[in-house]
Image (cartoon, rainbow, N blue to C red):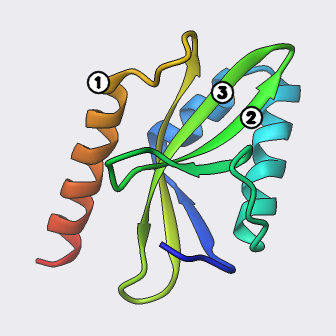
Amino acid sequence: MDFNVFRVVLTDAAVEFLRSIPEQARDKMNSNISRASKGEKNAEIFKKLHNTEIWEFRAEHRRISYRLFSFWDSEDEVVVVATHGIIKKTQKTPLKEIARAEAIRKEYFRMKNR
């Protein structure tokens, strides 16, 4: 997906995740979301996960990696839906978290296209 400017919509799980992390980490994540949504192309803050339709907003604070999973909806307007977040503890993104984001994406489009 080629992007320039987009709007970000947070699910309840994404909001809950952001509320659960330290304020400085939350501020950094919000800043990175804002930067990406205004068209900044930087894999350090917004990156597509290999072989999926899932993207992740990325932030690091005090050497802890925070990830907020998301997907594109460009049917009516350019929107990125943030599904949920994790504190990343290893180099590899947990497959169960990718699967969770993909399931939310599938359900989102199923409900939208009724």
x and y percentages locating residue 59 in the rendered image: 74, 34
- Which numbered tag is attached to residue 96? 1
Please report contact status of discs 1 and 3: CB closer than 8 Å, yes or no: no
Q: Residues within 10 Å of mark 3 (few under 14, many from 20)?
A: many
Mark 2 nearby-residue class (10 Å; few <14, some 14–19, many ≥20) = many
Q: Tell how many labels.
A: 3
Q: Is residue 66 above or below residue 46?
A: above
Alpha carbon separation for disc pair 2 and 1: 20 Å
Find numbered disc 2 in the image and state the secondary structure of the residue it sits on: strand
Mark before the other along the chain sequence, 1 or 3: 3
**At 54% across and 11% down in the image, what residue appears?**
90
Q: Which label sits on residue 66?
A: 3
Crowding at dot 1, Cα within 10 Å, few <14 / some 14-19 / many 20+, comes out as: few
- Indicate the amino acid at tag 3: Tyr
Residue depicted at x 85% and y 39%: 27
Q: Is the residue 103 above or below the residue 18 in the image? A: below
Q: Label for residue 59?
A: 2
Foreground residue among 89 and 34: 89
**Residue 43: image location, x then y, percent:** 69, 50
Q: Earlier in the sequence, mark 2 or mark 1?
A: 2
Relative depth, front residue between 36 and 22: 36
